[in-house]
Image (cartoon, helix red, strand yellow):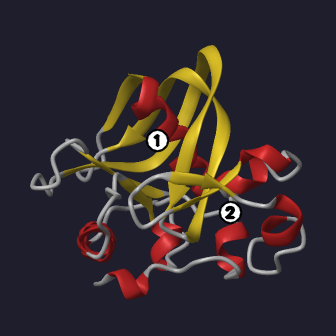
Amino acid sequence: MTKDHIITLPNPHLREKSKKVGIITDAIKKVVQNMQAATIDWEESRNHEVGVALAAVQIDSLLKIVVVRNNYDNKDDHTFAIFINPEITKLYGEIVEDYEGCLSVKDVYGKVPRYTKVKVKALDIHGKEFRVTAEGFLARIFQHEIDHCNGVVFIDHIHDKPNAFFQLKENGDLEPLDYDKHVKNNRILW
């Protein structure tokens, strides 16, 4: 699977809740492989961005599956941790605003408030339950991706904050977007 299989807004599936995975079949394992391949292919087409995670809905599969890069600081590491039926069991720490982008929201970044710590439970690829405690950027990733499983896109958290929207420039810098001109009534985003 390639980056071209990643759906983007305004695709209505991104606003739908994903379904729990019952049995981890070969078909489910194939979805996971496709998610990883699409993420890496997307990343290889970008100069200043890294594909750190993906939810199954983003390849148009409404299943509660998330893949997270094991080492998102190393673009050569193409391994992922797999979270099936991920669920946040605890949000805690401070709420901090920081930049987020999304493979399914083209050319828009946002300064999104998120908790700095989370506890997550999920199933691994073999169906065994496990738990993870995450802080900082990884906590943000979990909140972002589990939102996808619930039909929520990061821009939904900031829709009424005119100063929270940005775009990536050619040189890798983020530049504020004119909210009234590019965001407020943008049919693609909303």
On the picture, is 18 further left or further right than 185? left
Residue 46 located left or right of residue 20: left
Q: Residue at x 64, y 49 (%)?
A: 110
Q: What residue is shown at x 73% (from left), y 45% (from top)?
A: 164
Residue 180 sits in which quadrant?
Answer: bottom right
Question: Residue 76 got which mark?
Answer: none
| Residue lying at the far left of the rendered structure | 76
Q: In this view, does 64 lie above or below 89?
A: below
- Residue 190 visible in rendering: no
Determine the CA span between mark 1 and mark 2: 18 Å
Give the position of the C terminus as an image quadrant: bottom right
| Residue type highlighted by circle 2 | Lys
Residue 10, image quadrant: bottom right
Q: Position of residue 19 (x, y in %)?
A: 59, 63
Name the residue that disc number 2 marks.
17
For the residues bearing labels 1 and 2, Cβ distance under 8 angstroms: no
- Badge 1 crowding class, 10 Å Cα cut-off, few under 14, some 14 to 19, many 20 or more, is some
What residue is rendered at 53% in x and 80% in y? 7
Q: Is tag 1's residue or tag 2's residue first in the polypeptide sequence?
A: 2
Quarter holding the N terminus?
A: bottom left
Q: Quadrant of residue 104?
A: bottom right
Q: Mark 1 points at which residue?
A: 141
